[in-house]
């Protein structure tokens, strides 16, 4: 919420790739992804779902999260936010490869 207020007040004259509505939509989607990952850490959920199902949820959530982060941070048509998730994505894919072998 503070991020929404900060961007809404300080950057009214700037537009993202799809306008200010996309910032609200992508920000909301990011919050939903974070809440999904948080909710799956509860013991009740972990006991009901197998490890492989949780791993698939985390995999999809992680990849979708970072793709939405890149869209969320695109200002004036420049996708400059790819720099920030690149390191964690590389580490994640290394972990994914090691998990499979």
Image (spheres, grey):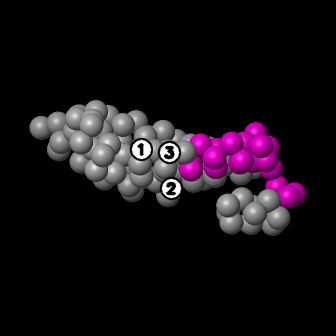
Along the line of sight, which residue is nearer the eye, 1 or 95? Answer: 1
For the residues bearing labels 1 and 3, Cβ distance under 8 angstroms: no
In whole angstroms, how far apart are the C-alphas of marks 2 and 3? 20 Å
Q: Which residue is mark 1?
A: 62
Q: Which residue is mark 3?
A: 33
- Mark with earlier residue (1, 3): 3
Q: Which residues are magenta?
A: 11-31
x%, y% of residue 32?
54, 45
Along the line of sight, which residue is nearer the eye, 2 or 94? Answer: 2
Mark seen at residue 83: 2
Asked whether, in this view, residue 33 is left or right of residue 44, the answer is: right
Image quadrant where one finds the N terminus:
bottom right
Local packing at callout 2 (Cα closer than 10 Å; few below 14, some 14-19, many 20+) is few
The residue at the point 46 percent across, 53 percent down is 85
Local packing at callout 3 (Cα closer than 10 Å; few below 14, some 14-19, many 20+) is some
User: How many marks on residues?
Assistant: 3
x%, y% of residue 31?
56, 50
x%, y% of residue 5?
75, 63
């Amino acid at each position: 919420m503070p991020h929404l207020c900060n961007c809404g007040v300080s950057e009214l004259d700037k537009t993202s790739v799809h306008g200010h509505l996309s910032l609200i939509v992508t920000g909301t989607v990011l919050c939903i992804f974070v809440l999904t990952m948080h909710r799956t850490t509860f013991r009740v959920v972990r006991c009901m779902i197998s490890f492989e199902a949780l791993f698939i949820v985390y995999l999809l959530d992680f990849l979708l999260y970072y793709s939405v982060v890149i869209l969320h941070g695109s200002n004036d048509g420049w996708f400059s936010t790819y720099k920030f998730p690149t390191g964690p994505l590389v580490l994640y894919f290394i972990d994914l490869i090691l998990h499979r072998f």
